Amino acid sequence: MLKASVFLLLTTCAVFLTGCTDPNRDAVKIGMNIELTGEIPAVGASSKNAAELFFNALNEQGGVTLAEGPKKVALIIRDNGGKADQAASVAQQLISSQDVVAMIGPNSSACAIPAGEIAESLKCVMISPWSTNPKTTLDQDSSQPRRYVFRGCFTDPFQATVLAKFALNDLGAKKAAVLYDVSSEAPLGQATLFRDTFTAKGGEIVAFETFTTGDKDFSAQLTNIREADPDIIFLPTYYNDVPLIAQQARRLGITAKFVGSDAWSSPEIIKLGGADVDGSYFCNHFSTQIATDEAKKFIADYTAKYGQPPDDVAALTFDSCGLITEALKAGGKNEREALREALSKIREYKGVTGTFRFEPGSGDPIKSAVILQIKDGAFQWVTNAQP
Amino acid sequence: MDYFAQQAINAIQLGSIYALIALGYSMVYGVLVMINFAHGDVFMVSSFFCFLLLLVLPVPFIAALLIVMLATAILGVCIERLAYRPLRNAPRVSAIITALGCGLVIQNTTLSISPYSQRMPELFTPVTWNFAGLTISSLQILIVGISVGLMLALDFFIRKTRYGMAMRAIAQDRVTVPLMGVPVNQVIAVTFAIGAALGGAAGVLYASAYPVISATMGVLVGWKAFVAAVIGGIGNVRGAVLGAYLLGAVEVFTVTVLPSTYRDLVVYTLLLVILIFKPYGLLGRPAVQKV
């Protein structure tokens, strides 16, 4: 008798569990493969915030409209620790066992390149909101564009041109020094591209120094740079390295201005860097100061919900979510191949970070950049750079 | 010339910090023949102790240094008591894995409390002097001064006091020495306390010199200090200091004469070469196998 009732109880539970408690069963599942811990946790946090903001609002309006009617979107968020190997295994897990229809992230190029490899081979759409390295959307063997990998931002060759022009023309710099993390994909690419463009446009690179991830002492490299006496120092490194470099440079008596890449964009850089980074310039995807009407709404919503204005990762993630939703609607099906097909047909998309233009067969949008300055503890818009 | 002198100053600062951490590895190894891989994370957590202390109470530098050293020493003793002592007679591999585990626990606890890097408040405003093209700050002098002072104190402690004698005795023979009435557990606890306290001092000095602290920073620095201890001859306290200054100098001067990309290549090639010719490190002595 007891046995029978236990059995009955268990079966009821089983039926109940499979029948009712899985709200994601009927939803459109989108995975997020982001840097919630590790060296750049602020990037993952912004990405998560923006995606939740976007899809919560969408779900409140009933969800995404497919051919069979509106469907809710379920986000499955996984941490890749900011590490390449972990990003690859998270991609594998999201696509194979969580069965997502698309994956947002990773954001850092070091993670996005291997994760893109997995997404491509498992035929699942991936959008990296923030990875600017050209290799993210390129197939490793054939150097042809990957079919399933897209991004929400401009690429490094464009960024290098923007920065080289800005340094030469607006800052009047003739001699530049570069210090970057040689073991991280995005900084490495940006440093080399900047060197080539700056030299091609008539400037001179007087010092080209490297360090490796995790280094905190840059005094030897900075002493070399001081000896070379540059007009500017280009630091294509993440926001967590810049403050220590800036502080050690100032202590050594280096007065040259710092110029940075989009890897600087987290407000953490102001908190960690203080006066040492004040007056520095960097290239970015987005500025809250020149927002369009849609962007203003996004900034207001984001600030109201999270208590701080969105940084560029947040804005780019928001646009990546928008692109996926647009493609889901156009494709009409909760299915990977239809989504890819529809996404690859989008030619123009107006997002909060500006207008995206896609060339046929390419996952890299063509869009404008902004130059910002860190001034009095805030990011100040300086100028726009058109493609 | 002043350029090389500046690099020499950089090398001495870096070497002093490596030395303080390397001492912790070397002391524990000397007494217990065990590599305490949690030491890098103990060093890291000490800089967070300092950060928290300054948030609550803006004490002067020396007070902060002493309080953090004490707190870290207590942590070191707790780790020894809870994690290592029960395994003292277990196979050596178990002890190493436990140490790695302790390090990960410390690191991830810190990570869960503070996932973001933190800006260390300034402990004092360093004065910078410029003369003959050289830049020296009072902070650098303080770092080198405190490091050298602590190292000399440790050397004196090990060579001239009864506890130091007991440590050296246990390092030589862990079976017979307890029979002579030496309180082994107590001596080992003191060893861990001193090792951790030195790591704590390094944490405070490091956080003043490099004032952005994060939960993962102990990994690389700890690893390099361990390398320094091995170069010098692990188990030998003077060797650890020698290895640390050598490592700092090689790192800095490689960058001075070669492109900085070659730095780690040169450092670790040198490590291999030293170990080929001196397998026990520069000052290490071959262990006598007792049957």
Image (spheres, helix red, strand yellow):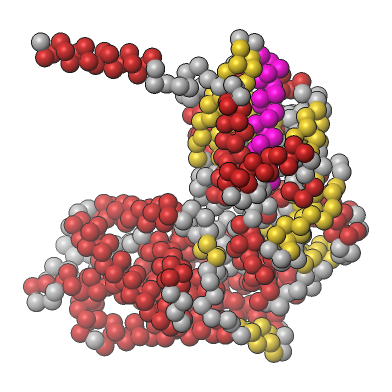
A343 relative to A12 in the view: left or right = right
Residue B240 part of the magenta-drawn span: no
Residue shown at 66% from the left, 83% from the top: B135
B248 relative to A338 in the view: left or right = left
A288 relative to B54 in the view: left or right = right
Which quarter of the picture shows residue B42?
A: bottom left
Between residues A143 and A283, which one lies in front from this camera angle?
Answer: A283
Regarding residue A35, the answer to whether it shows in the image is yes
Residue B165 drawn at (x, y percent): 22, 82
| Quarter of the image that includes the N terminus of chain B | bottom right
Start and end of the magenta stretch?
A312-332
Which quarter of the picture shows residue B254?
A: bottom right
Residue B264 drawn at (x, y percent): 57, 61
Regarding residue B14, the answer to whether it shows in the image is no
Depicted B208 relative to depicted A25: above or below: below
Between residues A271 and A126, which one lies in front from this camera angle?
Answer: A271
Residue A2 drawn at (x, y percent): 11, 14
Between residues A246 and A275, which one lies in front from this camera angle?
Answer: A275
Residue shown at 45% from the left, 21% from the top: A23
Residue A34 drawn at (x, y percent): 56, 40
| Quarter of the image that includes the C terminus of chain B | bottom left
Residue shown at 29% from the left, 72% from the top: B193
